[in-house]
Image (tube, grey):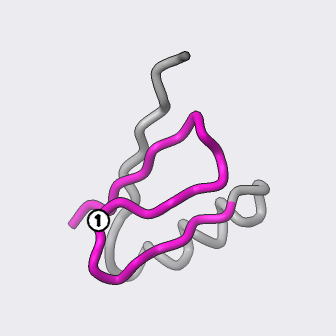
Amino acid sequence: MTTPLKLGIPKGSLQNATFALFKRSGWTINVNERSYFPEINDETIECAICR
């Protein structure tokens, strides 16, 4: 197993634009409003919401 790529996603005004960019690239990010760790449809990537 390889080490996952860890990405910080900005919270706030850039969050939706970042999600749209990922969607255009073929990744889907699912966010739970109470969690800082959204799910992405790629097992080799881990995401965290950064304030």
In the rendered image, residue 44, in percent from the top left (x then y), is placed at 58, 34
Does residue 36 sit above or below 16 in this rendering? Answer: above
Instruction: Examine the image and state in which quarter residue 10 appears.
Output: bottom left
Residue in view at x 48 percent, y 29 percent: 4
The one of 42 and 22 positioned closer to us in this rendering: 42
Judging by the rendered image, the residue that carries numbered circle 1 is 36
In the rendered image, residue 12, in percent from the top left (x then y), is placed at 33, 80
In the rendered image, residue 2, in percent from the top left (x then y), is placed at 53, 17
Q: What amino acid type should be assigned to the residue bearing mark 1?
A: Tyr
> Magenta includes 18?
no
Instruction: Examine the image and state in which quarter residue 32 appears.
Output: bottom left
Does residue 47 sit above or below 11 in this rendering? Answer: above
For the residue labelled by badge 1, is the local secondary structure a helix, a strand or a loop?
loop
Question: Residues in magenta?
Answer: 28-51
In the image, taking residue 7 as reference, residue 44 lies left or right, namely right
The quarter of the picture where the C terminus appears is: bottom left
- The image shows a total of numbered marks equal to 1
